[in-house]
Amino acid sequence: MSSPLVSILMGSKSDLDVMQPARDALNDLGVTHEVRVLSAHRTPDALIQYVADAASRGVEVFIAGAGGAAHLPGVVAAKTTLPVLGVPIPSGHLLGLDALLAIVQMPKGIPVATFAVGKAGAGNAGLFAVAILAGKRPELAQKLVAWRKAQADKLLKESVVD
Ligand code: RP5
């Protein structure tokens, strides 16, 4: 089996589009990752088995996106001491506010880092995963600096509107 550094989890295939920016960030920066759809309430046993297995294969960071009651990131965090980055997915009547509150309000003792609702949060979770990994990987830290510079250069090129 391959050993990706990051695992991107989501509770439903319907979350894939919102989670895409996390994949994009990891692809841009050349970080190995895998993507799985596993649900805390629909497939709890498979989820718990996967988390244990992924950690033993070398995964160092989990990104978990979920909508609604959104307990996926919390359940992942309950089963590993590796960093878990939670992304609230906008869905249903509450448009992600439900997921945001569910993820950000983890009771003391089992932390989940919570990101913005939707695609911005997914992208930032990807970048944050890279930042965590870059702590012990100087070449990755350099890539992150270059990525930030490219982002700034792009904005500066477009800064004169009129
Ligand atoms: C959550 O319920 C998923 O993360 C998804 O955001 C939401 C709706 O899932 P589906 O009904 O589209 O499968 O578990």
Image: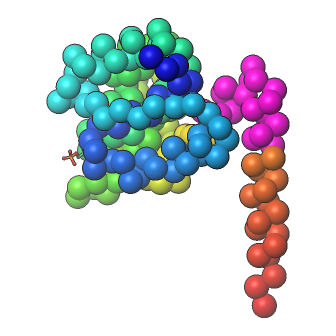
Q: Find the magenta span and give its range.
A: 128-145
Which of the 4 image quarters holds residue 104?
top left
Most extreme residue toward the front is 1
Q: Point out residue 48 in the picture as x, y percentages from the top left corner.
A: 30, 16
Q: Point out residue 158 in the picture as x, y percentages from the top left corner.
A: 77, 76
Q: Residue at x 39, y 11 (%)?
A: 52
Q: How many marks?
A: 0
Q: Quick check: 148 above or below 152?
A: above
Q: Residue at x 49, y 37 (%)?
A: 114
Residue placed most toward the observer, 76 or 104: 76
Can residue 139 be spotted in the picture? yes
Q: Point out residue 31 in the picture as x, y percentages from the top left corner.
A: 62, 33
Relative to 93, 51 lies left or right? right
Q: Which quarter of the image is occupied by the C terminus?
A: bottom right
Relative to 26, 105 lies left or right? left
Q: Residue at x 49, y 20 (%)?
A: 2
Q: What is the image's colouring?
A: rainbow
Q: Quick check: 23 above or below 156?
A: above
Q: Residue at x 39, y 29 (%)?
A: 73
Q: Point out residue 109 in the picture as x, y percentages from the top left corner.
A: 46, 15
Q: Quick check: 33 above or below 91?
A: above
Most extreme residue toward the left is 42
Q: Which quarter of the image is occupied by the N terminus?
A: top left
Q: Is residue 155 magenta?
A: no
Q: Quadrant of ligand 1?
A: top left
Relative to 117, 25 lies left or right? right
Most extreme residue toward the bottom is 162
